[in-house]
Amino acid sequence: MRLDKYLSIAGIGSRKDVKKIIRQKRVTVNGVISVNDDVHIDPYLDEIRVDQQILDVVLDVYIMLNKPQGVVSATSDDLHKTVLECIDVTLPPGCFPVGRLDIDTEGLLLITNDGDLSHRLLSPKRKVDKTYYLECRDTIDDKTVDILRSGVDIDDETLTLPAEVELLSEVTMNLTIKEGRYHQIKRMLAACGNQVTYLKRIKMGSLNLDDDLALGQWRFLSESEVEQLKKG
Ligand code: URA
């Protein structure tokens, strides 16, 4: 993160104010006076001081991971690699994955320490859209599309909410659901007599999986992505 951005998030002043403070040689990074506002610092590892006072700021972290198969959506696990272990920078304490993807599901997973945002994205009341790309064993027939669009009996107390279906080929589609029940997509297709053979989440709320992220890669969300997610 840029030093001037960090200082302004830490409440030292506007971006203009902090540039001035840096020019006045009042800021040190690991004991060395910094004269560049565009120097990149690691907010979790570097010691930043203004007028000799250490800044101790817990920043909100928002990370998009393209989850690979074989990795579990948990903060710790005795058997498998966790999604947190895919992030090869020091994270502040309290980061967690927002919701779960199955071990064999790939794609978009948000990792954050922002409990409020996570709650809003996962709250059943808010009905946040989640879009999955899926491949099926058998042809997706018209009857299946109708059932998915109207609500599926997956042996829960209620039918699933109507889903949006975008057929891509005879055996592939994008499916958008508004809930997050256990193994929901796989159970929806199983209830229609079909089977999901590949599953990847490509969108959650306003957030699209970045096509440039290979499996296992991650990046911080941009400010506008965070803003959009919070608005939604
Ligand atoms: N539905 C599933 O069946 N599995 C997932 O990982 C996500 C949604």
Image (spheres, rainbow, N blue to C red):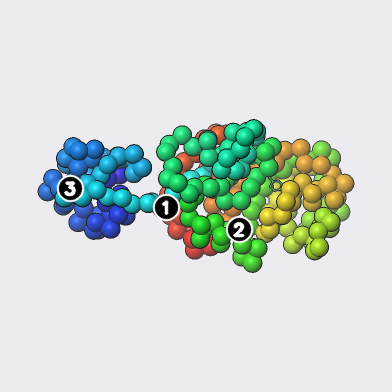
Mark 1: few, some, or many residues within 10 Å (few <14, many ≥20)? Answer: few
Distance between mark 2 and mark 3 Cα atoms: 42 Å
State the residue at coordinates (63%, 47%): 100
Q: Are marks 3 and 1 in contact (CB under 8 Å)?
A: no
Spot occupied by residue 68 in the image (x, y as percentages of width and height)? 61, 35
Q: Which residue is mark 2?
A: 122
63 relative to 173 in the view: left or right? left
What element does badge 1 sit on? loop
Q: Earlier in the sequence, mark 2 or mark 3?
A: 3
Q: Which label is found at residue 134?
A: none
Q: Which residue is mark 1?
A: 60
Rendered view: 24 above or below 115:
above
Distance between mark 3 and mark 1 Cα atoms: 24 Å
Name the amino acid, label 1.
Answer: Asp
Name the amino acid, label 2.
Answer: Leu
Q: Which residue is mark 3?
A: 52
Residue 148, quarter of picture: bottom right
Mark 3: few, some, or many residues within 10 Å (few <14, many ≥20)? Answer: few
Residue 164 visible in rendering: no
Quadrant holding the N terminus: top left
What element does badge 3 sit on? loop
Q: Earlier in the sequence, mark 2 or mark 1?
A: 1
Residue 162, quarter of picture: bottom right
Mark 2: few, some, or many residues within 10 Å (few <14, many ≥20)? Answer: some
Distance between mark 2 and mark 1 Cα atoms: 18 Å
State the residue at coordinates (68%, 58%): 179
219 relative to 150 in the view: left or right? left
Q: Is mark 3 within 8 Å of ligand 1?
A: no
